[in-house]
């Protein structure tokens, strides 16, 4: 019996990002808006963005509701890394999302995993 997927969950790890991009709230806000537009995901409400943490754990985190679920991201200022999770019951192209995220933050590498939610 084939189980229908509830949606896709894409988990991205970006390494060696441009330090200025992951430390700037306007850039991060623009990133989320552009990612949603690119993937055809409709944002619901304002982006929740906060910079917090202590010492090596300090950095921005975001959460954006979308009509079909959510996008979350965490930015590691110590190692210039980004960790992005996109979950939607609307189909979207994970490879397109990975390329966009890597290019936007000028990361040297991206690893990503796609999980079908059932």
Image (cartoon, rainbow, N blue to C red):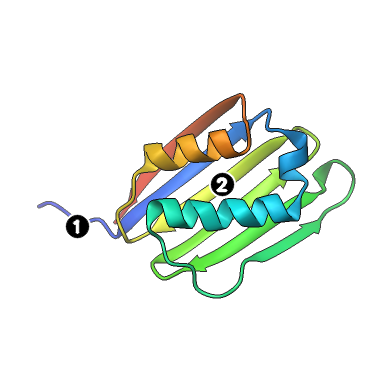
Give the vertical position of 76 relative to 1 (above or below).
above
Q: Is 39 or 59 nearer to us in this picture?
A: 39
Q: Which mark is residue 4?
A: 1
**Residue reaching furthest top?**
108
Q: Is 47 or 86 nearer to us in this picture?
A: 47
Comparing marks 1 and 2, which lies closer to the viewer? Answer: 2
Which residue occupies 9% across, 52% down? 1
Bin the neighbour count of mark 2 within 10 Å (Cα to Cα): few under 14, some 14-19, many 20 and up: many
Q: Which mark is residue 40?
A: none
Q: Does residue 21 appear in this view? A: yes
**Is 85 situated left or right of 9 in this image?**
right
Q: Quadrant of the C terminus?
A: bottom left
Bin the neighbour count of mark 1 within 10 Å (Cα to Cα): few under 14, some 14-19, many 20 and up: few
**Residue reaching furthest right?**
55
Query: Tag 1, which secondary structure?
Result: loop
Q: x, y (%) of residue 41?
A: 41, 61
Query: Tag 2, which secondary structure?
Result: strand
Q: x, y (%) of residue 46?
A: 60, 72
Contact check, label 1 and label 2, Cβ < 8 Å: no
Q: x, y (%) of residue 25?
A: 74, 55
Q: Does residue 76 appear in this view? A: no
Give the vertical position of 20 relative to 63 (above or below).
above
Which residue occupies 39% across, 52% down? 39
Give the vertical position of 107 relative to 30 (above or below).
above
**Is 115 situated left or right of 101 in this image?**
left
- Counting residues from the start of the chain, the first of labels 1 and 2 encountered is 1
Q: Is 41 or 87 nearer to us in this picture?
A: 41
Q: Which mark is residue 84?
A: 2
**Is 17 situated left or right of 103 in this image?**
right
Distance between mark 1 and mark 2 Cα atoms: 25 Å
């Amino acid at each position: 019996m084939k189980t229908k997927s509830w949606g896709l969950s894409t988990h991205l790890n970006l390494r060696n990002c441009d330090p200025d991009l992951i430390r700037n709230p306007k850039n991060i806000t623009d990133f989320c808006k552009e990612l949603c537009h690119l993937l055809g995901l409709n944002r619901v409400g304002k982006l929740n963005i906060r910079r917090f943490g202590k010492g090596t754990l300090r950095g921005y985190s975001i959460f954006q509701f979308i009509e079909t679920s959510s996008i979350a991201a965490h930015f590691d200022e110590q190692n210039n890394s980004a960790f992005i999770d996109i979950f939607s019951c609307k189909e979207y192209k994970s490879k397109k999302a990975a390329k966009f995220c890597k290019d936007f933050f000028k990361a040297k590498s991206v690893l990503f995993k796609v999980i079908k939610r059932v």
